[in-house]
Every structure is written in structure tokens, then in C-alpha cells.
Image (spheres, rainbow, N blue to C red):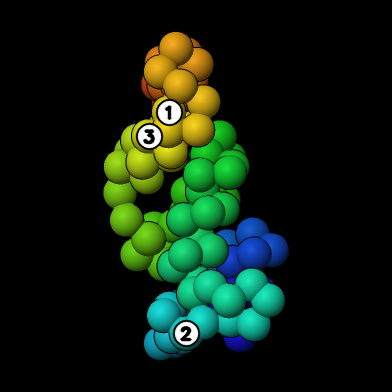
Amino acid sequence: SLLNFAVMGGRVALVEHLVNRGANLDLKGWRPHMTARELARDGFVSNRDRPGPRRILELCGGGDPDALLAEACDSVADLLGSAIAQDFRRRVAAAAASG
């Protein structure tokens, strides 16, 4: 969908325009087979230091940013082990605190 294209491309103004006009946030796209909400979540976790993905997450009702980052930390912990995950959590917290 056009909304999925806008979310993936980081086009904040277009996402806002489409959402304000009732675009379906739960319509699965084609390649990737994800909704705009899911794409917004992934985009935020991958680019949490940039303002665009955070705003897109908000517009798409993608959930609490801090909870998403905590979930990402837990996933990393499962994959990498507790020592590396603790360091990752510390770095995520420092990045979040710095703005």
C-alpha cells in the first residue's frame, strides 16, 4: 500500500497525511508481508536515534517506544547471552537519555 511505502521510506509528512485521512494501518503489504504498524515498529527499533522513525511510530499507533526498545534488548539477550545483553541495555539507555 501507499502507506507501507511511506513508512518504509521514512516519509513522515506523507504518513501523517494518509493516517489523518483514514489509511488502514493493519493492511498487510506485499514484500514485506507486514502492516504499517509492524513496519513502523521495526523502523523505530532500527533507527531509534532519528526523529522521523519515532514520529512515524507515533502516527501509526505502534506502541510505547521504551517498551519496544526493552523488547529488542530481550531479543538480543536471548541471542547473545547475558553479558553482551547487559552492555547493549546500558548503551540503549545511554542513547535514550542523551536524546
Kindly identify the amino acid type of the residue bearing the numbered disc 1.
Ala
- Which percent across, then down, holds residue 35? 49, 74
User: Which of marks 1 and 2 precedes in the sequence?
Assistant: 2
Question: How many C-alpha atoms fall within 10 Å of the one at disc 1: few (<14), some, or many (≥20)?
Answer: some
Q: Which residue is mark 2?
A: 27
Q: Residues within 10 Å of mark 2 (few under 14, many from 20)?
A: some
Observer-side mark, 3 or 2, equals 3
The residues tagged by marks 3 and 2 sit, at their Cα atoms, a distance apart of 28 Å
Pointer 3: what residue? 74
Q: Is residue 89 above or below residue 76?
A: above
Residue 13 left/right relative to 68: right
Label 3 environment density (alpha carbons within 10 Å; few <14, some 14–19, many ≥20): some
Tell me if residue 36 can be seen: yes
Residue 52 x/y as whole percent: 57, 51
For the question of whether residue 51 can be seen, the reply is no
Label 2 – label 1 distance at C-alpha = 31 Å
Secondary element under disc 3, as helix, strand or loop, is helix
Q: Give the residue pinned by disc 1.
A: 77
Please tell me whether mark 1 sits on a helix, a strand or a loop: helix
